[in-house]
Amino acid sequence: MSSKMGHLRLFFAAGLVVSAAALAAQTRITPPKNSYPPAKDVELGLQAANQAEQQLPIMHDEVASSYVDGIGKRLVAAIPPDLQHPEFRYTFKAVYVKEINAFALPGGPMFVNRGMIEQAHDEGEVAGVMAHELSHVVLRHGTAQASKAQKYEIGEAAGAVLGAIIGGRVGSVIARGTQFGLGASFLRFSREYERQADIEGSHIMAAAGYDPRDMANMFKTIEEQSGPGGPQWLSDHPNPGNRYEYINAEAQSLHVTNAIHDSREFARVQAHLKTLPPAPSTEEATKEASRGATPRSEGPPPSGRVEPPSSRYSTYSVGSVFRVSVPSNWRQAQSSGAVMFAPDGAVGSVNGQSVFTHGVEIGIARNETHDLQTATDELLQSLGRGNPRLGRRGPYRSIGIGNRDGIEAAVSNVSEATGREETIDVFTTLMRDGNLLYIIGVAPRDEFATTYGSVFQRVVQSMRLSS
Ligand SMILES: [Zn+2]
């Protein structure tokens, strides 16, 4: 493969006057041999992307999402014609975790961490990492690498991809039953592919109006700013040697003038991210996701138009864990490993996540070591990570839940579904095994004050715990 990389690609357009400097030519990149059709990239990438979206906290924040999407589209428009695959579907999503990392899956799905946007020095650096990731996609490195791993069926690879992204113990749990090593080979690239992605990424950046030197700068930023344990991004994308130097040399041959380094949007998105609650680490975030086993939920958003709660109550037994009474016009639904009771019109999905506008969700969160107050703090923090527009919580109040000591705390939020202000009323108590039982009531703020606040109290007072 490396023998093909020394070739030079010269661009002469008819009638164009080419300056002597332009003859310091760009390096030509030839995509590696691949025994799969491009449609396989698309299939595997979608499979892995679905998994990733179930496990990782995808940001639904308009400022961050549209910023990442905007840079992505600009880069896609700059892919050279010979590397365009019409069946590929490029998507760009921001992930609410703090590490400086990003990854792209075969066929087009790309994920950029909040930490990457926050720690970059300018827009060119963000675009640099994205151009590098995009180059792995257009050069089809994922399936080219899988073409070499003939020992395994390629279908197994997708299952292990997420394990490779997350790494460590959490990853091996998620990748259970699959070949972990193969997953790693799917996303951890050889030095030869790294060099290809650096060079092709330089070309794409230049064509999109960015300065490829910012890509080299970002690699330095990643090295400098990654926390303990070393940068994940660099272990997936190892330095082939002299990376900084050859990217700068390539940039020289590309003659970029008036490149975008910085932008007003970059300053805006960085300032915006500072106003959001701190992001968890990937490991923390995925632990929560596997605990809740959030299924992807498809369907229309809830209308939020519901009948008032009936004054008659119906009693439900849930497993052998608890009994609870709720207004008789609410129905039981399963949600994220918890149980939900809500009226018609209150439940739906927004961006693949199940949401509800009125009703209660009752569930159990793993807690082995903490007292009630600390466990409740943790629950509210995780609520904040899933709901970036969550407000400040009110004071904790002591409350009895099924003859046990409990806590109540109300938090304001803006509904993902309706955009209206809502009140989230959280009740918690400890189970005998130490786990945290929670009841979360949700209603629009005005309806909470007039009606639902007292309904939630009555629901909580009806709880009978048997473990
Ligand atoms: Zn790479």
Image (spheres, grey):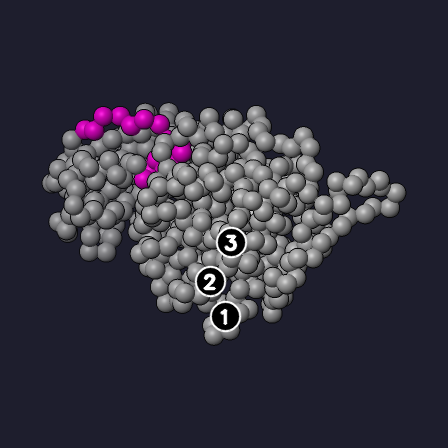
* Residue 240 tag number: 3
Is residue 337 visible to the viewer in this orientation of the structure?
Answer: no
Is residue 430 visible to the viewer in this orientation of the structure?
Answer: yes
Q: Which residues are magenta?
A: 382-397
Classify mark 1: helix, strand or loop: loop
C-alpha separation, residue under disc 2 versus residue under disc 1: 8 Å
Q: Are marks 2 and 3 in contact (CB under 8 Å)?
A: no
The local crowd at label 1, few if under 14, some if 14 to 19, many if 20 or more residues have their Cα within 10 Å, is: some
Front-lying residue, 363 or 3? 3
Q: Are marks 2 and 1 in contact (CB under 8 Å)?
A: yes
388 drawn magenta: yes
Q: Position of residue 261 (x, y in %)?
A: 59, 31
Q: Is residue 403 above or below residue 106?
A: above
Q: Nearer the viewer, mark 3 or mark 1?
A: 3
Residue type of the residue flagged with mark 3: Pro
The local crowd at label 3, few if under 14, some if 14 to 19, many if 20 or more residues have their Cα within 10 Å, is: some
Give the residue displayed 41% in from the left and 65% down from the top. Answer: 181
Give the residue displayed 31% in from the left and 29% down from the top. Answer: 411
Circle 2 is placed at which residue position? 185
Residue type of the residue flagged with mark 1: Ala
Q: Position of residue 235 (x, y in %)?
A: 43, 52
Q: Are marks 3 and 1 in contact (CB under 8 Å)?
A: no
Residue type of the residue flagged with mark 2: Ser
* Residue 149 tag number: 1
Residue 54 appears left or right of 109: left
120 drawn magenta: no
Q: Is residue 353 above or below residue 394?
A: below
Disc 3 under 8 Å from ligand 1? The reply is no
Q: Position of residue 78 (x, y in %)?
A: 68, 44
Front-lying residue, 387 or 370? 370
Q: Sequence-wise, which precedes: disc 3 or disc 1?
A: 1
